[in-house]
Amino acid sequence: MKKRRIDIADSGALSDLAFLLIIFFIVIAVFNINKGFILGIPKKESTKVVNTKDIIKVKIDADGTLNLDNEIITLSDLETKVSSLLSVSPNLTFLLKIDPEVPFQEVVHIIEIAREMSIDNFSFSMDENLQ
Amino acid sequence: MKIKRRKRRAPIVPINSMSDIAFLLLIFIMLISLINYRKEVKIEYPESDFQEITQGDKNIEIWIDIEGNYYYNGDLNSINNIEGLVAQEIAENPSVRIHILADKNTPYKNVNSIVEILKLLQHRAVSLVVKGGKE
């Protein structure tokens, strides 16, 4: 009986493997894209005139507690407050004072709210007095 | 006389060279991924459900770990060195996109040091990198 020769190229397994590897590398390349928020940085010691009624001042303490006009509020309360203020004054200016010791994640939560609600005038700075 | 009809063979597409093409593609993509090689620093990314793509044409990454160590494009550096490197990069390419990748538990003062440098250098925008929140 004649022995059948096996040709690797005919089997097609090699090209399948290569294509799987190609797909793997293409997927890996997508992971390098950064996602997040783009924030405008004001010039040092620059000033901007805004209506005092359009300003909302929020402070985050070291433990992540939110203060709005010396009143402790939750994140969801802040969201409701901001959306109601936005309906009254669309040019709302959001000022965020951050305690130096607050974990970065807490700051991200506030920025997320501001970006989600498309607040153009969003300013954040560290509370220098507490440093 | 009986004329023999030639048997028509079914057309064959040669696929033997397919694996060669595949491997060439593979080598090409592997080389390209080496060019895009990015040094990762071990941090816990801050989480956010809302996010946008912040990647620019030219990017630099400043990593801040939980202990407040700074890394410029993945290499450990002091804050003073980073200031010099960022200033040089901005001078060479003013439209460079600067990404801050800070650990979610790092104190904000560490992030602020970088923001202050960018303010001083009058760089207009910064990208704060986050990952998708837990679904």
Image (tube, helix red, strand yellow):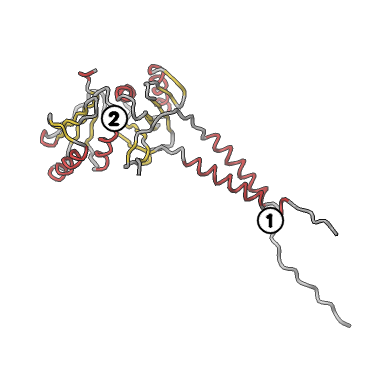
Disc 1 and disc 2: Cα gap in Å?
A: 57 Å
Exactly how many numbered labels are in the figure? Answer: 2
Which amino acid does the dot numbered 1 rest on? Ile
Q: Write down the chain letter for disc 2.
A: A
Q: Secondary structure at mark 1?
A: loop
- Residue type indicated by callout 2: Ile
Please provide percent x and percent y for residue B92. Answer: 43, 26
Asked whether the viewer can see residue B6, the reply is yes
Where is mark 2, residue-wise? A41
Q: Position of residue A67 (x, y in %)?
A: 17, 30
Residue A3: x %, y % from top left:
82, 56
Instruction: Tell me if mark 2 has few (under 14), some (14-19) or many (20+) residues whose alpha carbon lies within 10 angstroms of its own.
Output: some
Q: Chain of mark 1?
A: B
Please tell me which residue is depicted at 10% across the width and 36% down the height of the picture.
A53
Q: Which mark is residue B15?
A: 1
Residue at image point 19% right, 34% down? A94
Q: Do we see residue B117 in this rendering? A: no
| Location of residue A111 with respect to A12 vertically, above or below | above
- State left or right for residue B89 relative to residue A62: right
Nearest the camera: B30 or A99? Answer: A99
Residue B6 image offset from top left, x and y in percent: 80, 73
> In what quadrant of the picture does the N terminus of chain B appear?
bottom right
Task: Give the side of residue A61 with respect to residue B124, left or right.
Answer: left
Instruction: Give the camera-side residue of B35 and A80.
Output: A80
Q: Check the image and report above or below for B117 versus A35.
A: above
Q: Taking A105 as reference, is A24 above or below it? A: below
Which is more foreground, mark 1 or mark 2? 1
